[in-house]
Image (spheres, rainbow, N blue to C red):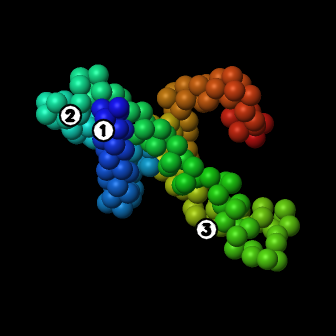
């Protein structure tokens, strides 16, 4: 039982260190796409997590299985954070909508008001398209030529995967179809 508590505590401490490092990286490298920032950080922190787990094993605080479990939990927690937090917190239409409603106070807003707040605050005010275009150039999904954007083969493959996953899980396919 003690081993399980130490293992969970170690994984939690490593994950919190990862989250703190991610916050610092976001401020130090603001031009990097969020997914790239977190992916590189995860790869960079994995050896540190392995070293921490190895130290716990060497000091006989954890057995080899528990030390391995710490690294696996760190990797899974970091991957979950990497692929969800930036997308939800930096891009969420729902968060923008809730923020607009919160700013509206007790007066409330009509659906048209909320839609206009999204266009003004998120698309225009947040420079959402410029940010996303820049990120996807960085990912290699699009290229810019003479001021025009074009999808690359990698971008097409990504869209094939997105369409497959959308159909598989019965998501709204308008997001990933040409019907928009």
- Dividing the image into 4 quarters, which one contains the C terminus? top right
- Give the SS element for disc 2: loop
Q: Is residue 56 left or right of residue 103?
A: left
- Give the SS element for disc 1: helix
Q: Position of residue 59 (x, y in %)?
A: 13, 34
Q: Between disc 3 and disc 2, whose residue precedes?
A: 2
Q: Residue, x 33% and y 58% (percent of image)? A: 24
Q: How far apart, in angstroms, are the residues tagged by discs 3 and 2?
A: 52 Å
Q: Where is residue 178 in the image (x, y as percent from the top left)?
A: 73, 34
- Dividing the image into 4 quarters, which one contains the N terminus? top left
In this view, the mark in front (3 or 2) = 2
Q: Mark 3 points at which residue?
A: 125
Q: Between disc 2 and disc 1, whose residue precedes?
A: 1
Which residue ends up furthest to the front in the rendered image? 1
Q: Residue, x 62% and y 52% (percent of image)? A: 92
Picture layout, residue 50 above or below residue 27: above
Q: Which mark is residue 75?
A: none
For the residues labelled 2 and 1, say whether their Cβ atoms are less than 8 Å apart: yes
Q: Mark 2 points at which residue?
A: 61
- Give the SS element for disc 3: loop
User: Label 2: how many residues lie within 10 Å, few (<14), some (14-19) or many (20+)?
Assistant: some
Q: Name the residue under label 1.
A: 6
Picture layout, residue 144 above or below residue 117: above
For the residues labelled 3 and 2, say whether their Cβ atoms are less than 8 Å apart: no
Which residue ends up furthest to the left in the rendered image? 58
Q: Where is residue 143 in the image (x, y as percent from the top left)?
A: 48, 41
Q: How far apart, in angstroms, are the residues tagged by discs 1 and 3?
A: 46 Å
Q: In this view, does 27 lie to the left or right of 85?
A: left
Q: Does residue 36 appear in the picture of this structure?
A: no
Q: Residue, x 82% and y 72% (percent of image)? A: 108
Q: Residue, x 68% and y 54% (percent of image)? A: 94
């Amino acid at each position: 039982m003690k081993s399980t508590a130490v293992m969970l505590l170690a994984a939690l401490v490593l994950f919190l260190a990862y989250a703190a490092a991610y916050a610092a990286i976001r401020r130090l490298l603001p031009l990097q796409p969020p997914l790239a920032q977190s992916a590189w950080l995860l790869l960079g922190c994995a050896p540190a997590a392995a070293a921490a787990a190895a130290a716990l094993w060497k000091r006989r605080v954890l057995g080899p299985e528990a030390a391995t479990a710490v690294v696996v939990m760190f990797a899974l927690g970091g991957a979950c954070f990497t692929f969800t937090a930036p997308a939800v917190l930096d891009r969420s239409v729902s968060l923008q909508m809730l923020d607009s409603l919160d700013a509206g106070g007790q007066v409330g807003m009509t659906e048209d008001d909320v839609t206009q707040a999204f266009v003004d605050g998120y698309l225009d005010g947040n420079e959402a398209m410029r940010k996303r275009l820049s990120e996807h150039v960085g990912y290699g999904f699009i290229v810019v030529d003479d001021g025009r954007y074009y999808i690359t083969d990698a971008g097409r493959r990504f869209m094939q995967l997105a369409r497959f996953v959308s159909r598989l899980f019965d998501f709204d396919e308008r997001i990933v179809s040409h019907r928009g």
